[in-house]
Image (cartoon, rainbow, N blue to C red):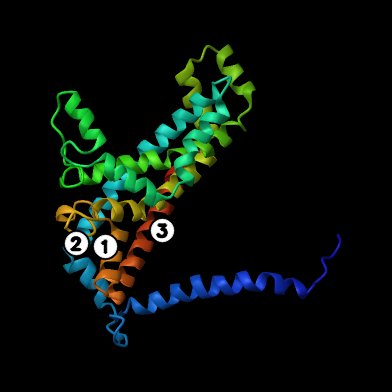
Amino acid sequence: MQRLNWHPIGYLFIAPAVVLFLVFVVVPIFASLFLSFTQYNVLHPPVWVGLANFLTIILQDPRFWKAFRNTIFYVLGVVPIGISLALLLAVALEELQRGKQFFKVLYFIPTVTSVVAISVVWKWLFAGEKFGLINSWLIRLGLEPIDWLLSPTWILPAIMIMSIWAGLGYNLVLFSAGLSTIPQTLYEAAKVDGAGWWTRFWHVTVPMLRPTLIFVVVTSVIASFQVFDQVYIMTSGTGEGVGGVLDSGLTLVAYLYDQGFQRFHMGYASAIGYLIFGCVLGLTLLNRRLLKSRD
């Protein structure tokens, strides 16, 4: 076996990336960990308070639990529906003889488009009374218009609808790549045995896509738990601050932003950030165990 030569000059090439990673990733992680145990408002030096921030958040902060419930509801709505639609569309596209790549590009366009731009467009679509496109359709159908972004009932579902649409193309491309690796002989054997479309999908496609499915579920849960841009854009301008009316659209990262960059409770916001990290880590491990336990 040939031994690799050691070239010190190689470290010079990776040094800029390593320095940037340390300065903008590693240092902020440990700095925020320290700040999570302090009371810090940017203008004065941090004051050590121990676990007081975490105890206050868990035991005495109803807005945190409101944001937590909204985030869980968002995850439970966006992840299953988004993944199911992306998988079904990917399977349907594989059946096409022509135009397959065109539709993949078409569905993928929202993924490479700025979330801010998408949110602004959907904010106009969801505009209240007769000014939004969706409400104009409802009026034409003889239905009552809905104040999507001013109603405590509809503001979070509106954000979820936009997020499902925006993330559909990314998951679709991943599932399409996974489907291309499944041997066609498995489908041919299933057809010979008399299996219908649903039987082939459930007993051939889904088991063979398990590695891709695990990856998509884990990344979708993480992304959904960290939702912020669309919440901030679609709830701004309502006069109620980030989160909208009665905090009905408030999510955990939006609440972190509110505490850290609007109220300047940096220590408190850092503690919220580490609680979010703990939730994401726990859900990720749970998802991997649940999906792998069926192998």
Callout 3: few (<14), some (14-19), or many (20+) C-alpha neighbours within 10 Å?
few
Instruction: Say which amino acid is labelled 3.
Output: Leu
Q: Earlier in the sequence, mark 1 or mark 3?
A: 1
Q: Position of residue 167 (x, y in %)?
A: 42, 42
Q: Earlier in the sequence, mark 2 or mark 3?
A: 2
| Residue pointed to by mark 1 | 255
Residue 281's disc number: 3
Q: Quadrant of residue 162?
A: top left
Callout 2: few (<14), some (14-19), or many (20+) C-alpha neighbours within 10 Å?
some
Task: Residue at 39%, 75% (x, y): give it.
Answer: 33
**Relative to 207, residue 254 above or below:** below
Task: Residue at 24%, 59% (x, y): give it.
Answer: 242
Marker count (numbered)? 3
Q: Position of residue 128 (x, y in %)?
A: 18, 41
| Residue pointed to by mark 2 | 63
Whether residue 166 is visible, yes or no, is yes
Dot in front, 1 or 3:
1
Instruction: Say which amino acid is labelled 1.
Output: Tyr
Circle 1 SS class: helix
Dot in front, 2 or 3:
2
Instruction: Say which amino acid is labelled 2.
Output: Arg
